[in-house]
Amino acid sequence: MKTTIDDCRIIELPKISARQGNITFVEGIKHVPFSIERVYYIYDVPGGEERGAHAHIELMQILVSAMGAFDVILDDGHQKKKFHMDRAYYGVLVPRMIWREIVNFSSGGICLVLASQPYNEHDYIRDYSHFIKLKNSA
Ligand code: T46
C-alpha cells in the first residue's frame, strides 16, 4: 500500500471521566488498527531537542501525548502535515513509510507510543533522500 498524508489521522481513544480523575485505555485492533506489540515512551526531552527524523518500512504507530504537548510533523514525500498533540485521549496514527519529526516538546512532555512491531533497526529509513527515492519508486 502506498501511504499518503491522508492516511495519517487522529484517533480518539476511550476516556472515562470521574471526580477522581480520568482514565484512558487502549486495546489493539479494537481501538487502534493493529495489534500492539510494543509500548515505549519518550520523556525528559531537553528544551529545543527533536526526535524522530526517520520513516519505517513496515511499522505502524500511534503517538499520544501522555503529559504536556509536542508537535508531530508527518511527511509522505509530497505533502507535510503538523499535528499538535496535547491530550492524553488523542493519538495520531503514523502508518508505514511516512517520515516523522517530533518537535516542540513542552517541559515535562511525555510521548507515549503504541507500536505494531517489536524494535527492529532494519525497519528504519534514516536517510531522507533514500526515503524519497523509495516513495517515488513505489
Ligand atoms: C519513532 C519515534 C516516535 C530501542 O532499543 N528500542 C525501542 O523500542 C526504541 C524506540 C528505541 N531503541 C533504541 C534505539 C536507539 O539506540 O533507543 C535509541 C534511540 O532510538 P531513536 O533514535 O530511534 O529514537 P527516536 O525518538 O528518534 O525515535 C523513536 C522510535 O525509534 C521511532 O520508531 O517513530 O520515536
Image (cartoon, rainbow, N blue to C red):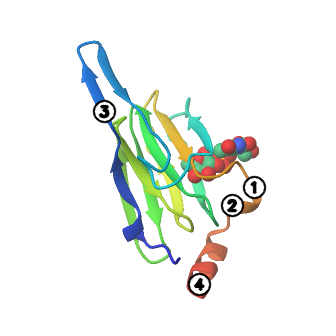
Ranked by sequence position, the earlier of labels 4 and 1 is 1
Residue 46 occupies which quadrant of the picture?
A: top right
Residue under numbered circle 2: 124
Residue under numbered circle 3: 15
Amino acid at dot 3 = Lys
Q: CA distance from mark 1 to mark 2?
A: 6 Å
Q: CA distance from mark 2 to mark 4?
A: 17 Å
Q: Secondary structure at mark 4?
A: loop
Q: CA distance from mark 4 to mark 3?
A: 38 Å
Task: Judge: label 2 CB < 8 Å from ligand 1.
Answer: yes
Residue under numbered circle 4: 138
Amino acid at dot 1 = Glu
Task: Judge: label 1 CB < 8 Å from ligand 1.
Answer: yes
Ranked by sequence position, the earlier of labels 1 and 3 is 3
Q: Position of residue 103 (x, y in %)?
A: 47, 47
Q: CA distance from mark 1 to mark 3?
A: 34 Å
Task: Judge: label 3 CB < 8 Å from ligand 1.
Answer: no
Kindly check if marks 4 and 1 are in contact, taking CB atoms under 8 A apart as contact: no
Left or right of residue 78: residue 60: right
Question: Are there few (<14), some (14-19), or many (20+) residues within 10 Å of tag 2?
Answer: some
Q: Residue furthest bottom?
A: 137
Question: Are there few (<14), some (14-19), or many (20+) residues within 10 Å of tag 4?
Answer: few
Residue under numbered circle 1: 121
Q: Nearer the viewer, mark 4 or mark 3?
A: 3
Q: Nearer the viewer, mark 1 or mark 3?
A: 3
Q: CA distance from mark 3 to mark 2?
A: 32 Å
Q: CA distance from mark 4 to mark 1?
A: 21 Å
Q: Position of residue 23 (x, y in %)?
A: 36, 25
Q: Secondary structure at mark 2?
A: strand
Ranked by sequence position, the earlier of labels 2 and 4 is 2
